[in-house]
Image (cartoon, helix red, strand yellow):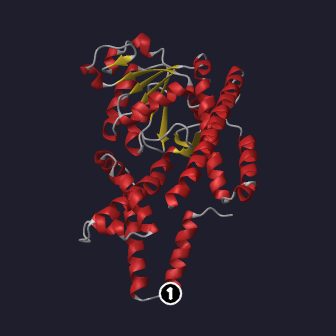
């Protein structure tokens, strides 16, 4: 029987797996010791040169192990992420000694909760404001409204993060500006144009206000690359320096763009990306085909596109509507989508091979960086 021959092999594999897990545990213990030493001197957790050498060594050994270079690289990238997480966590107490008191408005919401957790990992002491706390027993550092935070307490915060729905952001910012806090105010709206008047009033009131945009949702692990876009309103170096100190983390990537350019950029990065997912699903509703049949016969391309579309369609419809609605550049995106569809339909209808090939080449260039 084949099972009689498979059983001892599976048992042997199980023994090796247990040995690998023990080796992995020992590696994480050593990473923790490294993290302690780095925390003592405030050294960076991630050292790219070291990681690159480890990954290069892993790729070189791939053939000997009997797997592809990509598989070996993926294995060691996961191990390195685990080591970074371990080192970073071990240094939280040390970093807390250098952390700042911060306040998050909307701290019980999706991104508000993420921000609170992330900022605490960075080493800050984080208090939160959210009306949902009204149904809970009183707890230190949790407020039901901004009014519940006294002026003296408000001025102790090094920064106040505003994480509320897009439509509510101007009103909440106005409430904060009226209090004239000493600390930096950081709004994290996905679209910025409708905040222009509010930001101008903040400047006139002497309130320092930064326009930040986390390019991910609340399900993002803090131990993956974290891109934040800073929509600069003045001196980009000065604004970046102030925020970088608050967001110091191994995976933080802070990118600066002019405030006036932010929403046009987001029209393509968010508006188009979301729209393509919504169009994919909306078109399928008109196919008359069942999800079961589609998935049973699905190609690799369909499965990838379906996964991306589902990640969009599973999000908050109100948020995704507002991201489309509040962006003043949406008409430009919609026009481009219509023109691109019209062009491709015409090329297919005419069976124009050269034109179709050229259209796809142009599309590929739009997605690839020049070498």
Look at the picture and state if 213 lies above or below 105: below
Look at the picture and state if 300 lies above or below 244: below
- Total marks shown come to 1
In the rendered image, residue 169, in percent from the top left (x then y), is placed at 35, 35
Residue 327 or residue 190, whichever sits in front: 190
Q: Which residue is mark 1?
A: 353
Quadrant in the rendering for residue 27: top right
Residue 35 visible to the viewer: yes
Look at the picture and state if 204 lies above or below 359: above
Residue 268 or residue 171, whichever sits in front: 268
Residue 64 or residue 206, whichever sits in front: 64
In the rendered image, residue 212, in percent from the top left (x then y), is placed at 49, 38
Task: Report helix, strand or loop for mark 1.
Answer: helix
**Residue at horizontal 33%, vertical 68%?**
294
In the rendered image, residue 175, in percent from the top left (x then y), is placed at 34, 25
Quadrant in the rendering for residue 218: top left
**Residue at horizontal 36%, vertical 29%?**
106
Q: Give the side of residue 61 with respect to residue 18, left or right.
A: right
> In the current view of this chain or complex, which residue is farthest to the top?
152
Residue 117 or residue 130, whichever sits in front: 117
Quadrant in the rendering for residue 98: top right
Residue 245 visible to the viewer: no
**Residue at horizontal 42%, vertical 78%?**
343
Q: Quadrant of the C terminus?
A: bottom right
Crowd around label 1: few <14 · some 14–19 · many ≥20 (10 Å): few
């Amino acid at each position: 029987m084949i099972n009689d021959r498979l059983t001892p092999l599976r048992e042997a594999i199980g023994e090796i797996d247990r040995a690998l897990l023990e080796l992995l545990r020992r590696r994480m213990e050593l990473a923790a010791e490294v993290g302690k030493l780095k925390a003592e001197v405030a050294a960076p957790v991630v050292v790219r040169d070291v990681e690159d050498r480890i990954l290069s060594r892993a790729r070189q050994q791939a053939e000997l192990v009997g797997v592809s270079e990509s598989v070996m690289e993926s294995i060691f990238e996961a191990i390195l992420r685990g080591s970074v997480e371990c080192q970073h966590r071990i240094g939280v107490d040390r970093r807390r000694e250098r952390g700042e008191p911060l306040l998050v408005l909307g701290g019980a919401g999706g991104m508000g909760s993420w921000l609170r957790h992330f900022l605490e990992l960075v080493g800050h002491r984080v208090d939160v404001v959210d009306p949902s706390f009204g149904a809970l027993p009183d707890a230190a550092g949790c407020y039901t409204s901004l009014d519940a935070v006294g002026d003296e307490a408000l001025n102790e915060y090094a920064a106040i993060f505003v994480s509320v729905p897009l439509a509510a952001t101007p009103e909440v910012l106005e409430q904060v500006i009226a209090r004239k806090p000493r600390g930096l105010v950081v709004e994290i709206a996905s679209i910025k144009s409708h905040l222009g008047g509010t930001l101008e009033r903040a400047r006139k009131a002497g309130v320092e206000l930064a326009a930040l945009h986390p390019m991910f949702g609340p399900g993002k692990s803090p131990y993956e690359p974290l891109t934040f876009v800073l929509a600069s309103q003045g001196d980009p170096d000065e604004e970046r320096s102030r925020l970088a100190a608050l967001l110091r983390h191994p995976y933080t990537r802070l990118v600066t763009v002019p405030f006036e350019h932010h929403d046009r950029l987001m029209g393509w990065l968010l508006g188009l990306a979301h729209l393509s997912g919504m169009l994919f699903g909306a078109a399928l509703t008109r196919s008359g085909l069942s999800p079961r049949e589609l998935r049973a016969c699905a190609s690799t391309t369909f499965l990838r596109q379906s996964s991306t579309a589902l990640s969009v369609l599973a999000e908050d419809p109100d948020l995704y509507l507002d991201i489309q609605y509040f962006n003043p550049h949406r008409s430009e995106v919609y026009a481009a989508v219509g023109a691109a569809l019209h062009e491709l339909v015409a090329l297919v209808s005419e069976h124009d091979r050269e034109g179709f090939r050229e259209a796809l080449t142009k599309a590929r260039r739009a997605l690839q960086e020049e070498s």
